């Protein structure tokens, strides 16, 4: 029968482990700047190149989600019923009062372009949901109307407007005003 002996770590073993750990940390600290310099310049990211969107294939009543500057954007081709509902709502009594006319371009009321990020905790709401047939954030129950205005729930503000302009009747450029 052989006896099992357990070796206790000695001082040399501890020094080897400490030296190895220090070498790993030092290598990571040395390599990090080289990897980091491969990222694009912060000014380039913040600038956000303009995004051209063709509106022709978007059917009335359809909401399309696109990405600009790394954030989702809703483009809503509103129906006449949605437009009427948004225009006749008592906006003065809302938490973040803003008339529908300030949220759309004049003469192009059928198009609403807003950030697709809930103003409560940054979730992405689902379209054509809730009591106001606008957007519903399932995380905490915030409800927005067809103009992207907060109507119910904990969100403090309306869905943020996105800078855009019409290049033609069927094309918008997000990121330019």
Image: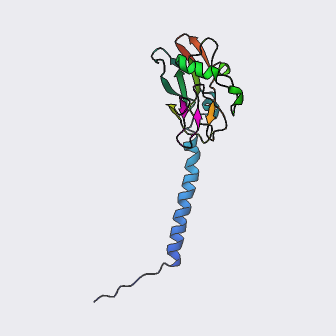
Report the side of 57 relative to 173 (left or right).
left
> In the rendered image, which quarter contains the N terminus?
bottom left
Percent across and percent down for residue 66 are 51, 27
User: In this view of the protein, can residue 49 be seen by the observer?
Assistant: no
In the figure, residue 69 lies in which quadrant? top right
Identify the residue shown where x is 48% and y is 17%: 60
The answer to whether residue 169 is above or below residue 43 is: above
> In the rendered image, which quarter contains the C terminus?
top right
In the figure, residue 84 lies in which quadrant? top right
Count of numbered circles on the image = 0
Q: Nearer the viewer, residue 13 or 93?
A: 93
The residues colored magenta run: 130-147
Percent across and percent down for residue 97 are 70, 29
Identify the residue shown where x is 57% and y is 12%: 167
Residue 135 colored in magenta in the image: yes
Percent across and percent down for residue 172 are 56, 16
Report the side of 19 relative to 4 (left or right).
right
The answer to whether residue 36 is above or below residue 134 is: below
Q: Nearer the viewer, residue 99 or 32?
A: 99
Q: Which of 143 and 19 is in front in this view?
A: 143
Percent across and percent down for residue 126 are 50, 34
Identify the residue shown where x is 49% and y is 74%: 13
Magenta segment main secondary structure: loop
In the figure, residue 25 lies in which quadrant? bottom right
Identify the residue shown where x is 57% and y is 25%: 146
The answer to whether residue 99 is above or below residue 156 is: above
């Amino acid at each position: 029968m052989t006896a099992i002996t357990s070796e206790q770590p000695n001082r040399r073993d501890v020094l080897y482990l400490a030296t190895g750990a220090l070498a790993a940390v030092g290598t990571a600290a040395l390599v990090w700047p080289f990897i980091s310099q491969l990222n694009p310049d912060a000014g380039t990211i913040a600038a956000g190149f303009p995004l051209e969107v063709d509106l022709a294939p978007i059917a009335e009543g359809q909401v399309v989600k696109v990405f600009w500057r790394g954030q989702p954007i809703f483009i809503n081709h509103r129906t006449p019923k949605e437009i009427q509902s948004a225009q006749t709502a008592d906006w003065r009594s809302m938490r973040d009062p803003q008339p529908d006319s300030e949220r759309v371009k004049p003469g192009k009321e059928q198009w609403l372009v807003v950030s697709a990020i809930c103003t409560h905790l940054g979730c992405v709401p689902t379209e054509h949901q809730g009591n106001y047939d606008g957007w519903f954030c399932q995380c905490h129950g915030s409800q927005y109307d067809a103009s992207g205005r907060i109507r119910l729930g904990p969100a403090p503000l309306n869905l943020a407007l996105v800078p855009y302009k019409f290049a033609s009747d069927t094309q918008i450029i997000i990121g330019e005003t």
